[in-house]
Amino acid sequence: MENVKVNGINLAYERRGKGLPLVLIHGYPLDHTTWNEIAPLLEKDFDLILPDLRGMGESDAVESVYTMADIASDIAGLLDHLKIKSAFIAGHSMGGYVSLAFARAYPERVHGLAMISSQMLADAPDRKEGRYKSAAEVAEKGVGVVADALTPKLTADARVQSFVHALMKKQRAAGVIGSLKAMAQRPDSSDILAKFNFPVLIVHGDADALIPVERGREMKTALPSAHYVELPGLGHMTMMENPKAVAEALSFFVKA
């Protein structure tokens, strides 16, 4: 892992492969290691940039409130550091929210956008309330409460469950709380999706118990030109459950 100072925090990242620049943005409350199995399948075609988002993995956690736009600004700063003017941006789950925030703020820097097990909609009021309740529980009881509750929703694959549960328990409370609040406050992105003039890829497992496959289908309806890949039998952690299938989907960018 390498580190760069961005927006006053140390941002950790890994870089591997060669070819077209592709930023892989992990979900909540995880880190870049969720891409470990798919990265070897992509590095022959892509210059992979795999950051740990602020508060996660080896990147600094901050106590102040921040937004998806702030996290997107971290990614822009990382690309500046690497002297990359534009890149393909792929986000998993919360990483998709960050990707949308990046595309909203820096459309000229996006070669293409991939939304993996994610959605364009903002939280409904009850979901937003649930995130704040979870944040309060983490502050009181620690990150284990999130790891225990979230693991069965992420995947039915026992091997992947073991990995993500251990990974979530490693995260710091400040990062988990900050991410929960940032997700709760994210804007609806339905207004910008139809305006994108770069290639868009949507990948969703039809057995996703956290973000239902209907959310992926809604994005395809909002942007008919998007390349849509629905993966039968896969849950929320598609790139870990079937790395080959997701790598094949991302190869769309090579031809785009």
Image: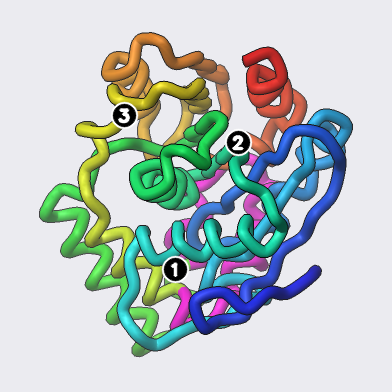
Please state, as top left, top right, bottom left or bottom right, where the C terminus lies in the image: top right
Coordinates of residue 190 in the picture (x, y in percent): 23, 32
Residue type at tag 3? Leu
Q: Is residue 235 left or right of residue 17?
A: left
* Mark sitting on residue 193: 3
> In which quadrant of the rendered view does residue 217 lie?
top left
Q: Is residue 254 above or below residue 125?
A: above
Decide whether the magenta segment is chiefly helix, strand or loop. helix
Coordinates of residue 159 in the picture (x, y in percent): 73, 48
Q: Is residue 165 left or right of residue 49?
A: left
Residue 163 in view here:
no
At x 68% / y 71%, what residue is drawn?
A: 12
Which residue has dot 1 on it? 146
Q: Nearer the viewer, mark 1 or mark 2?
A: 2
CA gap between label 3 and label 2 equals 16 Å
First in residue order: circle 1 vs circle 3: 1
CA gap between label 1 and label 2 equals 31 Å
Q: Which residues are magenta?
A: 147-175
**Cβ atoms at labels 1 and 3 below 8 Å apart:** no
